[in-house]
Amino acid sequence: METTLLTSVEVARFVAQGFLRLDAAVPEELNAEAIGVLSAGIPPVPYGTPLPLAFPEGSFARRLVEVPRVAGALRSLVGPDPTVDHHAVHVREPQGGSAQPLHGDAIIDTRTDAFDVQLMYFPHEVSPAMGGTLLVPGSHLRRTNESDTGRYQNLRGQIRLTCPAGTVLLLHHGIWHGGRRNDSAERRYMFKIRFNPTVRQVRLWDTADLDDPAVPEELSTRFPWYEPATGRLEVYNRVAMWRAMTGFDGFDVDHWATRVSNRPRRIA
Amino acid sequence: MKQQVLVLYLATSALDAPVVGWASYDGTGRTTPTTGDGDEPPYDSGVAALRDGWRLFQASQLIPPYPGHEYDTSFLKHEFFFEKLAD
């Protein structure tokens, strides 16, 4: 199976933002097939089913996750042989429904050395009126439980997704998001698959650019909704995640982690 | 009289700090604010809301981090509740 692995800079962007966006990654012929397949439903599988059993060879879902850009990004983040936690088809009816409260999926998940990835696939163009998924960049490392964040209606720098057909998002399990109200005259479809890793998530991507100065730049990204003080802690926590994902315990950004762990033992 | 509620999340604990997040609830039923319905806040700061007649009725306390959790991030810290009364 052909794949296109992510670069270190792209993975650092995922660590900082909590998601990656692959615009129009899925070919038109699969998108054309998708509405019928998703409307008919994709059979559920038991939690933790190996991918080849969850999505048999030739099935729509299998062909989706084997699109080279999608396969490469998944391999780079969760590694080989992930299991399918669960999957679901989300449909928003035209002129109907209400916005979901801002939430993280499942329950509070405090792992710092492993993470699940959620794939969101949008088979058709999502226009502003269609109420594309609301995403809060850089929220994935916040320790909050499910919809306890429901009070937050809008945050500066939030993303109200619009995208071309065939776009795939890959999300860290903790990211704050929500389906928005569909104010258009068209049904909106989204297919979601949650993947659990089965290997240590260490240097799974193309690491040729590991020392690129753009890596710490990505990891330093602040978002408009951050309180400045807490934004510094976000960078500190990303450093911890990057250390876990690279195995380099000395890595740092602007001395944040080094400074607060410096306890000299030498007696003068 | 019915209550309209505005919640502003500010960049620091100061009421004149910039707005980073917001929510509103309308007891009059004339508007139905909801999740993800706008990218621009109604005011640039908490004080700007005061100047427009909103009355502050609650501000989040400053609570020190729990020992061992000094680097954890969670909810937004600087939450201010305002109200207006309307017919």
Image (spheres, rainbow, N blue to C red):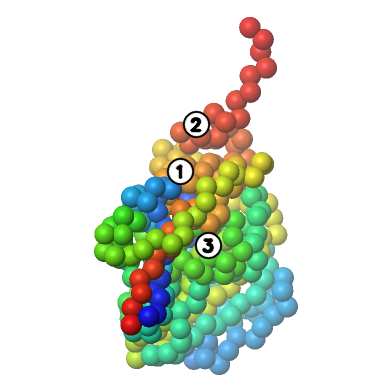
Q: Is B69 on the left or on the right of A179, as rendered?
A: right
Q: Residue at x 26, y 59 (%)?
A: B51
Q: Would residue B68 be found to the left or right of residue A90 on screen?
A: right
Q: Is residue A184 above or below residue A262?
A: below
Q: Give the label, 1 or 2, closer to the camera.
A: 1
* Place of residue B55 in the rendered image (x, y in percent of width and height, measured from the top left): 36, 63
Left or right for A201, reference A160: right
Look at mark 1 in the image and give the residue it sits on: A229
Q: Give the quadrant of residue A59.
A: bottom right
Picture coordinates of residue A70, whole percent (x, y): 50, 66
Q: Is residue B65 left or right of residue B27?
A: right
Residue bearing mark 3: A175
Q: Secondary structure at mark 2?
A: loop
Can you give x and y, in whole percent of width and height, for residue B38 in the image?
A: 33, 70
Residue tagged by mark 2?
A255
Residue A257 or residue A99, whichever sits in front: A99
Q: Quadrant of residue A196?
A: bottom right
Q: Nearer the viewer, residue A84 or A31?
A: A84
Secondary structure state at the residue bearing disc 3? loop
Who's the residue at 61% across and 35% down the image?
Answer: A249
Few, some or many C-alpha atoms within 10 Å of disc 3 (few <14, some 14-19, many ≥20)? many
Packing grade of label 2 (10 A; few <14, some 14-19, many >=20) is few
Density class for disc 1 (Cα within 10 Å; few <14, some 14-19, many ≥20) is few
Asked if labels 1 and 3 touch by Cβ distance under 8 angstroms, the answer is: no
